[in-house]
Image (spheres, rainbow, N blue to C red):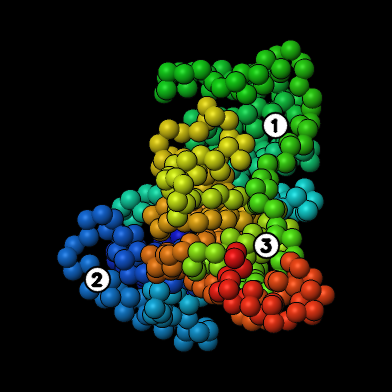
Amino acid sequence: MEFLLFGEVQLRVEGQPLDVGTPRQQAVLAALAVDAGRPVPIETLIDRVWGDEPPGEARNVVYSHLSRIRQVLGEVAELTGTKTGVTRRSAGYVLEIDPGAVDLNRFAHLVERGNDARETDDDRAAALHEALLCWRGAPLAGLQGEWADGVRATWHRRRLDAAVHWGELELRLGRPDAVIAAMADLAAEYPLVEPLEVLLMRALHAAGRDAEAVDRYAVVRHRLADALGTDPGSELRALHESILRGELPATAPAPPPPSSPAQLPPDTPGFAGRESALRRLGEVTGGPSPAARVVVLSGTAGVGKTTLAVHWAHSVARAFPGGQLYVNLRGFDPTGSPMTPAAAVRGFLEALEVPGERIPTTLDAQVGLYRTLLANRRVLVVLDNARDAGQVRPLLPGARACVVVVTSRDQLAGLVTEGAHPLVVDLLDDAEAHAVLRRRIGDGRIAADPAAAEEIIGLCAHLPLA
């Protein structure tokens, strides 16, 4: 069974497409499939299908489409003998399938392998090539609306990023002919994307076809002037000049690895207790496709939410080779105003080494760039001391491999209903409180006066901060 979202929305069983209904029903199916295995709230389904102006009967229409989708999936279950369907949970509706059956997820998984610096260049190039073969056309072809448009824009960017990365690897491996064939077609499809032209000119040069590379530059320069009224960018101009002067080596040097920020605050010396919470964090966020991409740690002031989040983040940092981002959102800071999402995302862009002149001016564009940079990386994001869900949403990556831990005094029910995993951080129990105190003052002093230790714990109300 395959869910194909590149090109027209299709459901295939043993290579044969099944009828998935009207465009509106396809939109509901696609809205579930992009989050396969995860709950999608009814409000999110309505927003993805209709945008900001749903009809009054939108809920009933969605229920009707869900019923028909269940019938289709029932046929699939009979044909294949596999258990599949749409189930309703407290947090929303879940398409109960292997996420790997969705072509968008296969693409993302293959790109993640292609970005893994531990793999050989050959293996990485092969994974990226396989990912690019998943592309059957613009995603959700035939579906209308802001959500479908946004999905298409995102995946066009991801396709281009993967293609450029594949081309760079192929050139390093000394295979320019493959790059020439692929980039010529892509450049025709995306005529204003200069990185494709850079790769094509480099490949032509590596194949000993400098005259064609110079001619290519002239074509691109005229195209940009006609379409945008601009000249080629600095990289393309410098490449052209290097080819003319004969200064360009035949093989490209390996590019520097992408920046991997490490913004976590220092871990707390002598951390003790919280074994259950640490175990639960590991359970819901572990593996390449975590059960929860967002975890909300909530609890009263001084209960140790930040300490817990930072300690756990340090313990799993190696599992996030793309880096660790941290920000104190100052949601309940008595000394100042909460940090705005714009300020937080700009800080993340700077940590990802985006030059100031390349940072967009609007929040939406900044969020789009931030999510694009994290699209093919496994990054851990810690959003500390959040005031409400609205402050957090713009800072959530779109990549499935990224994990976000949010701390707040509020339970952030808005995020939980959208699929975040809630984890309440309670007061230390007696054993944990003794462990914290023991780490602080030593076994000897507690053994010398256990009654005083009990009194200290009581006076601190089992709060680790106290």
Q: Please, what is the three-letter code of the amino acid marked with disc 1?
A: Ala
Q: What residue type is labelled 3?
A: His
Q: Where is residue 281 in the image (x, y as percent from the top left)?
A: 61, 70
Q: Nearer the viewer, residue 418 or 124?
A: 418
Q: Could you tell me how far apart the alpha carbons at marks 1 and 2 are, in whole angstroms?
A: 53 Å
Badge 3 vs badge 1, beta-carbon distance below 8 Å: no
The reply to whether the C-beta atoms of the residues labelled 1 and 2 are less than 8 Å apart is: no
The residue lying at 72 percent from left, 75 percent from top is 435
Name the residue tied to disc 2: 59
Q: Earlier in the sequence, mark 3 or mark 2?
A: 2
Q: In this view, does 42 lie to the left or right of 465?
A: left
Whether 132 is drawn above or below 233: the answer is below
**Image depth: mark 3 or mark 2 in front:** 3
Q: Mark 1 points at which residue?
A: 203
- Crowding near the residue tagged with mark 1, few <14, some 14–19, many ≥20 C-alpha atoms within 10 Å: many
Rendered view: 249 above or below 137: above
The label on residue 311 is 3
> Is 175 or 242 nearer to us in this picture?
242
Viewer-side label of 1, 2: 2
Answer with left or right where residue 436 lies relative to residue 237.
Answer: right
Picture quarter containing residue 309? Answer: bottom right
- Does residue 183 appear left or right of residue 1 in this picture? right
Q: In this view, does 329 lie above or below 28?
A: above
